Image: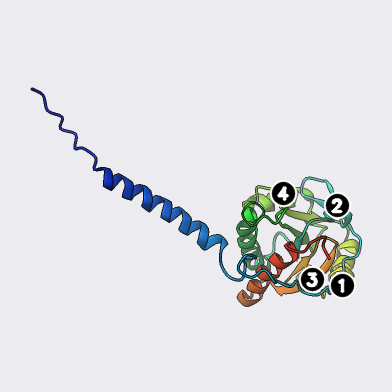
């Protein structure tokens, strides 16, 4: 007579393991996507911030050498900022925060049924040094692996005008160090909906809330 030395699995224990794993998964999803007030089903009366100004038309170039214009971004909600690739002070701090929001919103379209996920648009304040090739290396450095975060360059005049006239941000022409530290929220129709300090936690909380509000707008109005 032979014996089997392998202990038998207790059916109850197996069920408990499955229940635990499912609960852990649901808990992770809940923590990520159900936080108040970033949940339209908990707060269905979200009101988007008022229009601040209309972004002026622009023609810029991304890290792949492709042209990006205000018209090409129409229909998408986006968050913009200014930076330069060799900055060692403000820019890395801003982009640490930008990367968090970029990562957080990756699944908003699927989970929250908001349509297209938001875009992030970082515009160099030093186009003389920040060529498309330099921007591509910078994107790799930050682990950007999809086209939801665009890095743009262009002429000095175009970038200065976009900052000052298009976004109403302070900037000294030709001096990268004077670029603004604000993030700018833009709706589907190219309207600025708000300015947010790119390194302030409270301002960034407001940006997350306002971003969702603008995403929930019907017809961009």
Q: Residue at x 90, y 62 (%)?
A: 158
Quick one: label 3 or label 2, which is nearer the N terminus? 2
Find residue 33 and report its horizontal and vertical position in percent. 57, 61
Q: CA distance from mark 4 to mark 3?
A: 23 Å
Label drawn at residue 53: 1
Pointer 3 with pointer 2, Cβ within 8 A: no
Find residue 199 and report its horizontal and vertical position in percent. 64, 73
Label drawn at residue 193: 3
Assess disc 4: are there few (<14), some (14-19) or many (≥20) residues with their C-alpha within 10 Å of its C-alpha: few
Q: Circle 2 sits on which residue?
A: 72
Assess disc 2: are there few (<14), some (14-19) or many (≥20) residues with their C-alpha within 10 Å of its C-alpha: few
Q: CA distance from mark 1 to mark 4?
A: 26 Å
Q: CA distance from mark 2 to mark 1?
A: 19 Å
Find residue 34 and report its horizontal and vertical position in percent. 56, 64
Pointer 3 with pointer 1, Cβ within 8 A: no
Q: Circle 4 sits on which residue?
A: 147
Does residue 217 lie above or below 143 as drawn? below
């Amino acid at each position: 007579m032979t014996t089997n030395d392998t202990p038998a699995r207790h059916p109850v224990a197996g069920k408990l393991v499955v229940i635990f794993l499912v609960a852990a998964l649901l808990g992770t999803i809940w923590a990520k996507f159900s936080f108040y007030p970033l949940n339209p089903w908990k707060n269905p009366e979200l009101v988007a911030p008022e229009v601040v100004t209309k972004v002026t038309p622009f023609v810029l170039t991304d890290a792949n050498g492709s042209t990006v214009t205000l018209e090409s971004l129409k229909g998408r909600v986006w968050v913009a900022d200014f930076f330069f690739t060799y900055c060692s002070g403000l820019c890395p701090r801003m982009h640490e925060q930008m990367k968090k929001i970029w990562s957080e919103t990756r699944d908003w379209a699927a989970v929250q049924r908001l349509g297209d996920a938001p875009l992030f648009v970082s515009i160099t304040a030093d186009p003389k040094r920040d060529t498309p090739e330099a921007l591509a290396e910078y994107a790799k450095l930050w682990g950007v692996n999809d086209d939801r975060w665009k890095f743009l360059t262009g002429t000095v005049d175009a970038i200065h005008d976009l900052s000052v006239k298009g976004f109403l941000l302070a900037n000294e022409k030709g001096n990268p160090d004077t670029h603004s530290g604000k993030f700018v929220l833009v709706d589907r129709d190219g309207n600025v909906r708000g300015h947010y300090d790119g390194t302030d936690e409270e301002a960034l909380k407001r940006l997350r809330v306002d971003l969702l509000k603008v995403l929930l707008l019907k017809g961009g109005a």
